Amino acid sequence: MANRVLWTFLFALTVLQSSWSAPTFKRLQVEFDVANEMFQLMSATLEDFKDFFQSVIDEAELILPPDSKSTILEMCQELINVLNTMDIEDSLEMERMEEAMEDIVNLFESLDSSKLSSEADEIVVSIFEQHGGEDIERRLEEKLADALQRIEQRLADYISTWTDSRQARNSDFLKWFMDFKNEKDPFEKLDLLYQSDFL
């Protein structure tokens, strides 16, 4: 009986070491690395936005009369309140982070609106511009491009370990990877990543 258990155990180890099973562990590591890279990007971006919005609020409070009302400033404060209650280091907060990012997008769309509701809103928009509101998308795009470059390299390293037969079995993934690798626009590249199996 002991021999049977030993042989079963040895067979299981051999199977795990085979070229078919071993990449499963590598794939799990790659999936983790990709998800972690995106989580780190989102966490850092939310922190940057929080600091940016706080600087806008601080300056607006110095400039605006005490009785003025700015919808945009209220949106900024609401976002900061949400971000302050969020543990940005906790991956379990991803859903709330995603909602916060949607709120940030809505806020920036409000800034572009020609229907600003008050003179105070117009002043807040100028404060946004003075604090680099125009550059924030460029900075985000640079961070995104850097993160996607690290992900691309990680995936390339993973694929480089594949045998010819594994490449043949995963031709759809290899086609996707080439599209991902050749995409130059970071936002389009991000869309490709979300369409993959790695997020």
Image: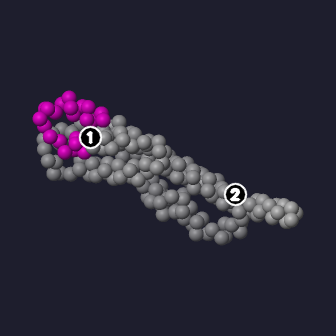
The tag on residue 77 is 1
SS at mark 2 in the image: loop
Which region is colored magenta? 54-76
- Residue lying at 52% horizontally and 63% vertically, measured from the top left: 196
Mark 2 residue type: Thr
Mark 1 residue type: Gln
- Residue lying at 45% horizontally and 60% vertically, measured from the top left: 191
Mark with earlier residue (1, 2): 1
Q: Which residue is mark 2?
A: 161
Left or right of 193: which side holds 45?
left
Asked if one can make out residue 149 in the rendered structure from this viewpoint, the answer is no
x and y percentages locating residue 32 in the rendered image: 57, 52
Left or right of 71: which side holds 55?
right
- Residue lying at 57% horizontally and 50% vertically, measured from the top left: 33
State which quarter of the image contains the N terminus.
Answer: bottom right
- Residue lying at 52% horizontally and 52% vertically, measured from the top left: 35
Asked if one can make out residue 35 in the rendered structure from this viewpoint, the answer is yes
Q: In terms of depth relative to the viewer, which is nearer, 4 or 117?
A: 4
